[in-house]
Image (cartoon, rainbow, N blue to C red):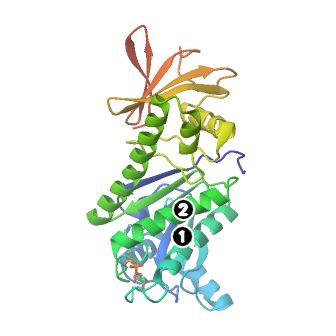
Amino acid sequence: MKRNLQSTVIEFIQGDITRAEVDGIVNAANSSLLGGGGVDGAIHRAGGSEILEECKKIRARQGGCPVGEAVITTAGRLPAKYVIHTVGPVWNGGQHEEEAKLHSCYIQSLELADQYELESVAFPNISTGIYGFPKTLAAPIAIRAVKEFLSAHPQTSIKKVQFVCFDKENEEIYRKLLEQDAELLIHHYIEAYNAFDIEGMLSVLHPDVIFRNIVGNEVSVETKGLQAFRALAEKAAALFSTRHQTILELRELNGRIEADIDYTGVLASDLPDGVKAGDTIRLQGRSIFMIRDGKLSLIEDYS
Ligand code: AR6
């Protein structure tokens, strides 16, 4: 089922993608689709022969998979339902369209995920192993491609995109990039907020900013103007498992983000007990606290 509102979370984790509990994992395959080393080998080993059998059928049909393109198979015994096999470029100095091809891997994989109505997709750091693509160049391409896709597909089924970093180096690179984005956004927002600059606040809610990863909190918006604010409120609604609420205020306090929420409609059944209009909700890490009469109480914990 497709959702009307874009509210996709982009996150990164360190780990082994074969264990990812998502609808689809992406494989950094080669054009033969017959398996190999690295993450490809790990996926085929853990998923079993069913994956290879389907790859062989695709080969018979279309003769492998060109660089920058993607195909989809079952995930066999893996926790995921599907494996999306994409073929990254071999790094060859950077003058052979390596960047465009890597970008295309992410876009085509997401297109397939969307076509199959997957809600969550995990990517490895394509091409940055055996294929030798510099990790510091590959990560921003990957993040940009995902954001571009989500911007262009506001109705997508995809609610979560996860970058699974196997090596420490990639994990550090992704952490820096995603945190920088979040910090920059908050910084601009707070500045505009302090200056009572409504236009400035809204301008922060830029179409490109589709993800939040503020130490684990997600708030995202997609358009300018009043609509952007509504989207922000809706996004918060998803996070808080409530419906029809308005954000009265969003601010940073000692490195934390606080939002004053006004509930104006029907609340979802799983809303934490006792929350009502005018309450202050504090997001901290992956926990949500309510502040009333100077007291802080934990109401939801996603960690
Ligand atoms: N989970 C997540 N990421 C992993 C895992 C894992 N289990 N194992 C390795 N990585 P690579 P490439 C990371 O070499 O560069 C194969 O032989 C790894 O740290 O798997 O696109 C194919 O058949 C690195 O960051 O893929 C092709 O011939 C990233 O996955 C060729 O390698 C990609 O490394 C593709 O080379």
Please identify the quadrant where the C terminus is shown. Answer: top left
The spot of residue 155 in percent (x, y) is 70, 53
Q: Residue at x 33, y 61 (%)?
A: 173
The spot of residue 98 in percent (x, y) is 46, 83
Task: Please report whichever mark, 1 or 2, sits nearer to the chain's N-terminal start.
Answer: 1
Which residue position holds label 2?
146
Residue nearest the observer in this picture, 80 or 141: 141
Q: Badge 2 local density, few (<14 within 10 Å), some, or many (20+)?
A: many
Residue nearest the observer in this picture, 253 or 75: 253
What label does residue 5 carry, if any? none
**Mark 1 touching mark 2, by CB under 8 A?**
yes
The residue type indicated by label 2 comes to: Val
- In this rendering, does residue 242 appear at all? yes
Residue nearest the observer in this picture, 261 or 159: 261
What label does residue 106 carry, if any? 1
What SS does tag 1 mark? helix
Report the side of 293 relative to 87 (left or right): left
The spot of residue 83 in percent (x, y) is 54, 69
Residue nearest the observer in this picture, 264 or 114: 264
Q: Residue at x 54, y 35 (%)?
A: 239
Ligand 1 image position (quadrant)? bottom left
Based on the displayed image, in which of its 4 quarters is residue 61 positioned? bottom right
What SS does tag 2 mark? helix
